[in-house]
Amino acid sequence: MYQTIVFEKKTGKIIKILKNQYIRTQTQLARLLGLPSIHNLSYIYFPHDIDINPDDYYVKAPAPNTPYQLFSKDDTLLTLKIVQEKARKLINHSSIIDIVFEGGTGDYMLQADVVYQLTQKHPEKGFNLYVDPSRIPILRLILNTENITFFPTSQKPKETNSYIRFADITQLGYYNPPYGKVATYCYIAGINPDVPISTIRIPPHLEEQAQNIISSLYPDNNTPRIALHRQSGEPNPKTWPWQQSWLFMTELYKKYNIPTLLIGGYGEQIAECEYILNGLGIWEWDLLAAILSQFHAIIAIDSAIMHIAHRLHIPVITLWGPTTPDYILPNILHRNIIQGTCPKIGCMQYACNSNQCMLSITPEQVLKELEKIINLNNHHNET
């Protein structure tokens, strides 16, 4: 059962609600409505069988480049409330809750925040988490309670109504200020959106490994440890270009005699020199988290490294272009932020070839922000 909601584009006013009616063409829609022209109208599909009074609801796009959604007159996204209530019923009637994760490692960190709160709220229940097996070690640094069991996503339940599926976010959108993207995951899991940021806890064996690695990277223990994550996977519009990155690392070393640990994937661009330490594709997620936990500051694009650093509760400078903090982060993490100056900033487009937004972030901007959050002068004066 679904409903096709026809509305005015300009006002969001609901014109007609059609039951189980798939629209193939604009001509078909005009015929169904008995109108000669529908150029000022559009429609959305609402996949829930509830009574909708057109006078009590309206349609809008919550933000630029986001899909139209159905809102009540008090500006509550109706779909999220329905999804939240559905999840609550599932949890209340189940002793074991199946939850399927989705997305990249950064998304997993947000979902881990949600699941952690669920385990605190329902300690009497068991939680089966279906995840990418390669991410289980880092998830265990947040989700290490006895009532959690991990399974590979290939073993997820076949009956979709029997589990919580975080991938539903693709149908719901995630523009939810002041909470950020995690809010939609919260609604999907049946809880309120104001969840706190979880803490990554480093166990002793990883801490020891990390200390040995850091000792080899930084013979002088007094050297401030700075890491840069400029690229996530293949080059894309979120990448901070190499030229800017290289100039930043050069200037940091020239001015303060501090090398930068460049972290990212194996095979990404790097220069062999004394002021760039190679951390590309070397460590698994859990060991990388242990290493970063002993750093003084992280500079990162919108990426998994950013989310990990936030959960380590260390200073993070974040670089933004096609995505924006309003979409991704709760307001409490809106600090040490540098955004590009492209007129289309926050376009959420990943097919852009110009990379203008990230190109506009200068090495000088990043170094100036770093100087605000960490005292670099003391080390410089000692060398």
Image: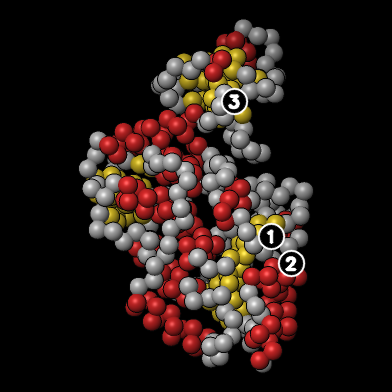
Mark number displayed over residue 283? none
- The amino acid at mark 3 is Val
SS for callout 2: helix
Name the quadrant containing residue 238: bottom right
Dot placed on the residue nearer the N-terminal end, 1 or 3: 3
Q: Residue at x 67, y 16 (%)?
A: 38
Q: What whole-number distance in Å separates the C-alpha atoms at marks 2 and 3?
A: 40 Å
Specify few, some or many for label 2: CA neighbours under 10 Å numbering under 14, 14-19, or 20 or more: few
Camera-nearest residue between 22 and 343: 343
Q: Is residue 17 above or below residue 287?
A: above
Is residue 155 at all visible to an observer of this figure? Answer: no
Camera-nearest residue between 149 and 53: 53
Q: Position of residue 51 (x, y in %)?
A: 44, 17
Q: Residue at x 43, y 62 (%)?
A: 199
Mark number displayed over residue 338? 1
Name the quadrant containing residue 90: top left
Dot placed on the residue nearer the N-terminal end, 2 or 3: 3
Q: Residue at x 41, y 35 (%)?
A: 84
Quadrant (top left/top right/bottom left/bottom right) for the N terminus: top left
Camera-nearest residue between 103 and 345: 345
Q: Are marks 2 and 1 in contact (CB under 8 Å)?
A: yes
- The amino acid at mark 2 is Gln
Q: Position of residue 318 (x, y in %)?
A: 62, 62
Dot placed on the residue nearer the N-terminal end, 2 or 1: 1
Closer to viewer: mark 1 or mark 3 = 1
SS for callout 3: strand
Mark number displayed over residue 365? 2
Q: What whole-number distance in Å separates the C-alpha atoms at marks 2 and 1?
A: 8 Å
- The amino acid at mark 1 is Ile
